[in-house]
Amino acid sequence: MRTKMVFTIGGSIKPVTRAFSSISIHKLTDHVVEMRMEKAPVNSFDSDMLKEFASSVKRLENDTNVKGLVLTSAFPRVFSAGLDLKELTAPSEENFKRFWRAVQHAWKSYYLSPLVTVAAINGSSPAMGAILALSSDYRLMGKSDKARFGLNETSLGMIPPPWLMALTAQVIGTRQAELHLLMGTLCLPHEAKAVGYVDGVCEPDELLATAIAWCDKACAIPRQARGALKIEQRKQIASLCDESSVSFMSNCVLGTEFQSTLARVLEGLKKKK
Ligand code: CO8
């Protein structure tokens, strides 16, 4: 257990003791907070991180002073490496389904949040990392010749669930979604901008300030109208993310193609050392 200082928007500081802690909240402006992912080394999402992510969003929604959040990473080269690959390695069906329900819950909490959400992508952001960015109201990526952004699920042997196919098509258009999901493309920042994955690319030292400025502007739109519009635009895609999607993913992830591809991916990550 470690104690962590959590800053609330009202300026008060609450010490919170948790068994795990992968996310911290920092006040940025009167109505905007930074939600910083800080699970070393690469912000991979295991069950605990998923739970903490969803509960952090909920806590911010319950704070009447907070209107918007900027999602960031504490690590300079990685925004998020996506789901924790260890959670996907030969799980029992029961454990996998429990994990996937947590994935879906965390995603829906963020995708349907009435808060203004902006992703400030300061490094590589494959798979679930990209999904969180695509689920934000606005996304900005820092210039880099090393960072990659994209949906590489198929190259891992994972079939993107129907709600992810729909989300991708909604953001980048049907034809581009077909191409990039099929190829599992990982894009450099300027390529991600050209595809429409991100709304803007800026110098790394301007990333946070640019994200805050956009978030502040969106927070000035009347809250009820803004929130209702967002739900209307998103509820159909969110409705695809249900128990049938859990079974769909269970068939894929427990299958031999995914498990043998994953073993090669893990081997490749080890060999990098
Ligand atoms: N899970 C667990 N551990 C990971 C992951 C991961 N996703 N990614 C990296 N690591 C580990 C590495 O094994 C390494 O561990 P160790 O230090 O013990 O050897 C450590 O993190 C550091 O990794 P790197 O040395 O590779 O760090 P780099 O900064 O050089 O590179 C990258 C960072 C680019 C993120 C790179 O690690 C990478 O490409 N990782 C794999 C990313 C990936 O393919 N993720 C897919 C996850 S599956 C997923 O998210 C599917 C979502 C789909 C569905 C939608 C539902 C919501």
Image: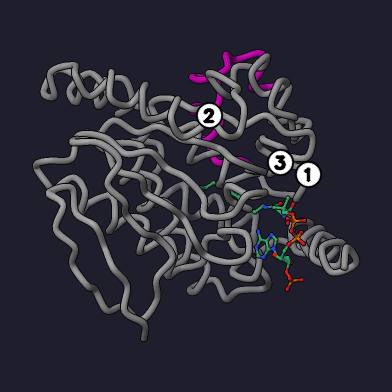
Q: Mark 3 — residue?
A: 152
Q: How is the image coloured?
A: one colour
Which of label 2 and label 3 is nearer to you? 2
Q: Mark 2 — residue?
A: 206
Asked if the stretch drawn in magenta spans residue 214, the answer is no
Q: Is residue 5 left or right of residue 84?
A: left
Circle 2: residue type: Glu
Q: Is residue 177 left or right of residue 260?
A: left
- Residue at image position (56%, 23%) is 198
Please report the bounds of the magenta region as a residue range: 160-178
Looking at the rendering, the quadrant in which ligand 1 lies is bottom right
Up-down: is 1 above or below 241?
Answer: below
Asked if the stretch drawn in magenta spans residue 170, the answer is yes
Snapshot quadrant of residue 149: top right
Callout count: 3
Characterize the local packing of mark 3: few (<14), some (14-19) or many (20 or more) Cα atoms within 10 angstroms. many
Q: Residue furthest right?
A: 271
- In contact (CB < 8 Å): disc 1 and disc 3: yes
- In contact (CB < 8 Å): disc 1 and disc 2: no
- The picture places residue 52, in percent across and down from the top left corner, at 35, 63
Front residue of this view, candidates 199 and 108:
199
Characterize the local packing of mark 1: few (<14), some (14-19) or many (20 or more) Cα atoms within 10 angstroms. some
Closer to the chain start, of discs 2 and 3, is: 3
Q: CA distance from mark 1 to mark 2?
A: 33 Å
Q: Mark 1 — residue?
A: 155
What secondary structure is marked by label 2? helix
Q: Is residue 163 visible?
A: no
Mark 2 beta carbon near ligand 1 (under 8 Å):
no
- The picture places residue 19, in percent across and down from the top left corner, at 35, 81
